[in-house]
Image (spheres, rainbow, N blue to C red):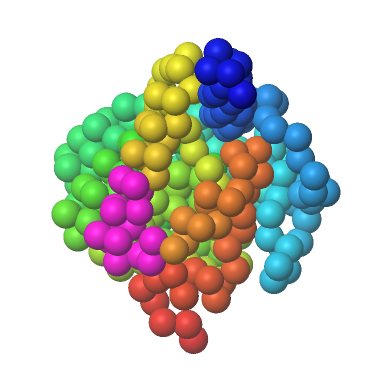
Amino acid sequence: MKPRSAARAMMGIFVFQLGIGALLVMGDIKGSSLSLPRFTPDAPRLNQPVRPGDQRRIYRPDRDAPQVRPARAPGTLPDRLTLTFEDSQYRLEGAISPDDAPRIITQIVQADPPVQDLIVQSPGGSVHDALELGRHLRTSGINTRILSGEICYSACPYLFAGGAARLVDPTASVGVHQHDFDKNTYLPAFVAIEDIQRGQGEVMSYLNDMGVDPLIMRHALATPASEIYILLPEQIQTYRLSTEDKQ
């Protein structure tokens, strides 16, 4: 092959790889509908039962809203994290929005009576804020719980992992999937991919610091943002997401 032809071929391969990278990145940002072609059957809906080996569900909480039990407004969760104190229990519920961590940390620090145990329920959101808040929970020695019939998806398990002691009811629903780690959705593909890889490394280091087996990430990395992988009770124990021994 002539030098010019070889150069053109290499350039074509490079452009093709950038295009693939762009599709991968854009397909995972904010639940975008743009993604690579799928050659496997669509996952069942979120409200369908989960069985071993059949744990991926379409992640559309707006369409398949689980039967959640929030502290307020039955059947819905707040648009942003909300700390409440009712019936002698602190609850932290709602979507995790950017900059929620410093706001909630301030509320926890100022709480009276002090927060010792925290019920967590969230459909997920900002990974950065989930990690920041989780680290504060651990430093403060605050325990976390997910109650019967309640949910903790996406970035929520990372927040939950910050608990000094952690308890997940066997009938709670806990799920993980891929994330977008950058607020800028218009980055060049190779920069965005590098940012995602850096973010994944940060999450794995965080989980290890919290005493959770980072291998839990293999399910997250294999599940696109448009779907959610629901963890079985035995997996929650195996990955040490719960510190409570299985009864």
Vertical order, 24 against 134 (above or below): above
- 108 or 233, which is in the foreground? 233
Vertical order, 171 against 234 (above or below): above
Vertical order, 110 against 115 (above or below): above
The residue at the point 79 percent across, 49 percent down is 40
Q: Which residues are magenta?
A: 201-214
Q: Position of residue 113 (x, y in %)?
A: 21, 51
Q: Is residue 28 within the magenta segment?
A: no
Residue 219 image-quadrant placement: bottom right
Q: Is residue 153 visible?
A: no
Relative to 54, 157 lies left or right: left
Q: How many marks?
A: 0
The secondary structure that most of the magenta stretch takes on is: helix
The residue at the point 22 percent across, 56 percent down is 138
Q: Position of residue 220 (x, y in %)?
A: 53, 51
Q: Is residue 34 visible?
A: yes
Vertical order, 106 against 9 (above or below): below
Residue lying furthest bottom in this view?
Answer: 247
Residue lying furthest right in this view?
Answer: 41
Q: Position of residue 208 (x, y in %)?
A: 30, 61
Give the quadrant of the N terminus: top right
Q: Is residue 208 within the magenta segment?
A: yes
- 155 or 152, which is in the foreground? 155
The residue at the point 53 percent across, 71 percent down is 235
Q: Position of residue 102 (x, y in %)?
A: 24, 32
Residue 162 image-quadrant placement: bottom left
Residue lying furthest front in this view?
Answer: 2
The residue at the point 58 percent across, 18 percent down is 2
